[in-house]
Amino acid sequence: MTRICIVSPFAYGALTGGDRGHAGGVEQQTSMLARWLARRGHEVSLVTWDEGQPDGEIIDGVRVLITCRRDAGRRFIRFIYPRWAGLNRAMNRADADVYYQNCGDYFAGQVAAFCRVKKRPFLYSVASDPDCDRRLPKLHAIRERVLYRFGIRRANRIIVQTHRQREMLRENFDLESVVIPMPSALGPEGQALTRPAPPAVPRMAWVGRIAPVKRLEVLLDVAEQLPNVQFEIAGQPDVYNDYSRGLLERVRHLTNVTMHGLVSRRHMPILYRGATALLCTSEFEGFPNTFLEAWTFGTPVISTIDPDSVFSRHGVGTHVNSADEMAAAIRRLLASPALWLELSQRGINYVATHHDPERALTAFERELLSLVDSKPTAGA
């Protein structure tokens, strides 16, 4: 039995079903990995923010260790205390043989520093293309960029989602990495073998955080062009500011747009099965879980990003560059049931072939265990 600690501060909501708190793609992946590793017989700890849960709570075999409340402490010093101090205490309580963290933020540096002192291996996983960009566009504070660079350079191994990310890491940071395709976070259960026809009522789904990078405004531009098509939004704002409030106000004036808020994991299959297509309007992504989930249920994808050129190479979706192009792609899909059925079946086949959960999670386990066997030392 191997002791594995996963650091994912926002993952408690995903571990408990995704109907509270933040439950983005990173959190879905890490909670899925945690539960799978626990079922394999490993001793798994998941380090998260304190969201009111008891410290040491066991969920599906995973021990949840809390750091502190995200809003705890005084301004200017809370970064050190209680946040960093609480993280170190939680990781120390885990007493793991190997530590894992996914997402390009300052936590990478904090986990790497802990592992360096404790002489424990650290496996880092890239979550999005900007994590591989030397400019680090998602990190605005100097301390965040410094800690992130420290973290990836001290990681004993790096996992990436796509070949593009591997090339970006080489070019921008001179670092090598291992490509492991992400598994569908909804898992294989209930996977459709085929969908015989699109839904009778044209319905487009949009799933994600309401944040500038996700560009919900593009979807609303499309909805204005297609008043006879229904649009359903599953997600909530990262923060309630002028940007998010403006979008929510705009939604209230669009009769063909429904805002569902945060949708629990158990209800996501209903959303995907009822959708004609999944729409993605993001500025950048890694390899979105939402794509894998939509394809699992035979739902075509129309997107402003094409990770690893999967649309052009495998014909599993439509890549567009603007709201006008997205509206045109929707019209073509609605006008041709044969095209819809072809994309639906291609998506199902692609996920089954390239993103099988058991194969992908076994690859993660193999990397974790190989680091334990390598016994890194301080300064490695």
Image: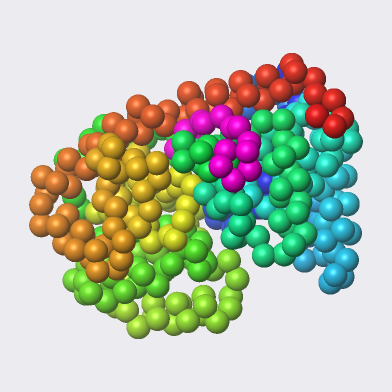
Q: Quadrant of residue 373?
A: top right
Q: Pick the residue in front: 253 or 355.
A: 355
Q: Is residue 176 magenta?
A: yes
Q: Position of residue 210 (x, y in %)?
A: 50, 66
Magenta span: 170-184
Vertical side of 96 occupied by 1: above or below: above
Please state, as top left, top right, bottom left or bottom right, where the C terminus lies in the image: top right
Query: Residue at image x 32%, y 33%?
Result: 350
Vertical side of 209 occupied by 111: above or below: above
Is residue 280 something that shows in the picture? Answer: yes
Query: Residue at image x 71%, y 23%?
Result: 371
Looking at the image, residue 208 sits to the left or right of residue 306; the answer is right
Vertical side of 109 occupied by 4: above or below: above
Query: Residue at image x 62%, y 56%?
Result: 136
Is residue 61 something that shows in the picture? Answer: no
Q: Is residue 349 magenta?
A: no
Q: Pick the residue in front: 369 or 271.
A: 369
Vertical side of 253 occupied by 191: above or below: above
Q: Quadrant of residue 80?
A: bottom right
Looking at the image, residue 211 sits to the left or right of residue 34; the answer is left
Please state, as top left, top right, bottom left or bottom right, where the N terminus lies in the image: top right
Q: Pick the residue in front: 242 or 191.
A: 242
Q: Position of residue 176 (x, y in %)?
A: 60, 32
Overall secondary structure of the magenta section? loop
Query: Residue at image x 59%, y 46%?
Result: 172
Say how many tags the image has. Answer: 0
Q: Position of residue 236 (x, y in %)?
A: 51, 66
Looking at the image, residue 268 sits to the left or right of residue 81; the answer is left
Q: Position of residue 242 (x, y in %)?
A: 55, 82
